[in-house]
Image (cartoon, rainbow, N blue to C red):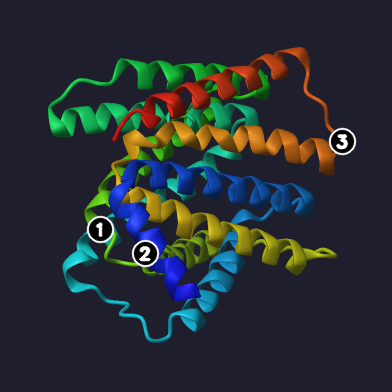
Amino acid sequence: MLKKITISIKQLENTHTLQMAIAYMLIAYFFHAVQATFYKCGHFTVVPQFMFVTSFISFITLHLVQFNQNMYPKEKMPHIIRSQVGIGIGTLFYFYGVNLISLSEAVILFCTNSIWSQIMVSIMNKEGITKSRLFNSILCIIGVILIANPSFQSKDPIQHIIGCLCILICSIIQSYAFIIMKQIGTQIPSSVTVTYFNIIMLFLSSLQQQYIAKFEYFEGYFFYTLGFSTFTLLAQIIKFRAQTMVTYDKICNYSYSQMIYIIIIDFFVFHSILSINGAIGALCIISGVYKQLREDRQIK
């Protein structure tokens, strides 16, 4: 039964590549939204320790479920290493930047990755940017700004600028890493790529943890960590699969669906209600994602 389902999915990937990649992105970012809920419930403060534990759990899980898998696809290793090192380094920049600016500002700056990816692909392929896709990105970013409602007050302007630059660097580096993942191809299971990401994150987070030298533990620490790890792993496997099927610029706008998922989850879990500006922002994101979906449905 499982084999038949796998064959059917692969056939759909071959005949409806873009549409399947879009579906994977929408599913993956739902899991990312659930992952974010576990993070908020846990109230983690020592991020490198948390990243190390989650990467360790993910690595062990992946090792157990793909014991007989070829973990060293020689021809694709340069692309795997480059992309995953890029994502890992970008992640470190992100968490460093978040310590210097507000989370709302970080979310907004990171969301520019859809624009960076379109610019990069345009330069690489020496072709123009699709105006409608760029417009949809800008519409979604406006929605994120309205929802996040950032505060620009800062006691130390220099630290604030450094924090903003860190988030932008993360956005640019990860955009490039997501783009080159297309070169890995669909022959390599995304679980293999995710394994290398977690190995790299184990190394990078352990180095950062040595520098910080702080540890934390609270009631429910491992429950929230396990929940975060599980949904992060599911999201990464599905998202990385999508990114090896098409170039990231074609599916980047679907990452904004995470904001809509978070709004819905927050309403049921935390009983939080959006402000008027937040509601307008949500409508902007829904409009941008829906408009992109309609346009992509016409592509064969």
Q: Amino acid at mark 2?
A: Thr
Kindly state the secondary structure of the residue where label 2 is placed. helix
The tag earlier along the polypeptide, 3 or 1, is 1
- Residue 90: give x, y in percent of width and height: 42, 46
Q: Nearer the viewer, residue 147 or 189?
A: 189
Do the CB atoms of the residues marked 2 and 3 lie less than 8 Å apart?
A: no
- Residue 188: give x, y in percent of width and height: 30, 66
Q: Distance between the Cα atoms at labels 2 and 1?
A: 9 Å
Question: Which disc number belongs to residue 205?
Answer: none
The tag earlier along the polypeptide, 2 or 1, is 1
Tell me: residue 208, above or below residue 271. below
Do the CB atoms of the residues marked 3 and 1 lie less than 8 Å apart?
A: no
Question: Which disc number belongs to residue 271?
Answer: 3
Residue identifier under label 1: 184
Question: Which disc number belongs to residue 193?
Answer: 2
Q: Amino acid at mark 1?
A: Ile
Q: Which residue is depicted at the point 26% across and 48% down?
A: 180
Do the CB atoms of the residues marked 2 and 1 lie less than 8 Å apart?
A: yes
- Residue 288: give x, y in percent of width and height: 50, 21
